[in-house]
Amino acid sequence: MPTPTDPAHVARLRTHLGRQGMELNEKLTKLLAGQNATLVTMKMPWEEKPGEKPQEKLRRFLDTVSRAQKRLGTEAWGLCIDCGAEVPEAVLDEVPWTERCRPCQTKWDA
């Protein structure tokens, strides 16, 4: 997927990433303060690592969202970070923090 050039499209993606980052930050803050935070409703970009604490999962996810925010508007946007293949636009519109194409994500999760 080429870098989106439509300012409205870029703005929508930035808003989506910003909201996700704020939600992650809020949940992480709650967990670190000893409060409950529900993670079940969050669409994580990978399989859960065995023994991973919720705080670790949220930090990893927040890092992923931050990397996506940095890639948006650059030539790296929409390209798999492992093989350079294009990630489908429909996937990025729904889950803009997607970093890998499906085959590479499958290998990563294995």
Image (spheres, rainbow, N blue to C red):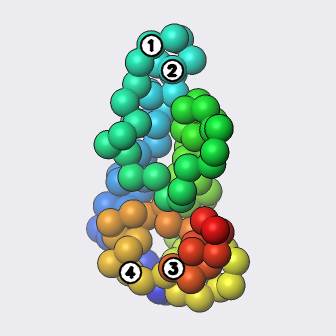
Q: Are marks 3 and 2 in contact (CB under 8 Å)?
A: no
Task: Give the position of the C terminus as an image quadrant.
Answer: bottom right
Judged from the image, the secondary structure of the residue bearing numbered disc 1 is loop
Which of the 4 image quarters holds residue 4? bottom left
Up the image or down, 110 lies above or below 61; here it is: below
Element carrying mark 3: helix
Mark 4 vs 2: CB contact within 8 A? no
- Return the x and y of residue 6 as percentages of the image width and height: 35, 77
Find numbered disc 2 in the image and state the secondary structure of the residue it sits on.
helix
> Type of residue at label 4?
Glu
Q: Which residue is mark 3?
A: 102
Tell me the residue that label 2 is attached to. 31
The Cα atoms of the two marked residues, 1 and 4, are separated by: 37 Å
Label placed on residue 35: 1
- Considering only order in the chain, which callout, 2 or 4, is on the residue closer to the N terminus? 2
Q: Which residue is mark 4?
A: 89
Coordinates of residue 87 in the picture (x, y in percent):
49, 81
Lower position in the chain sequence, tag 1 or tag 4: 1
Name the residue at 53% across, 11% down: 33
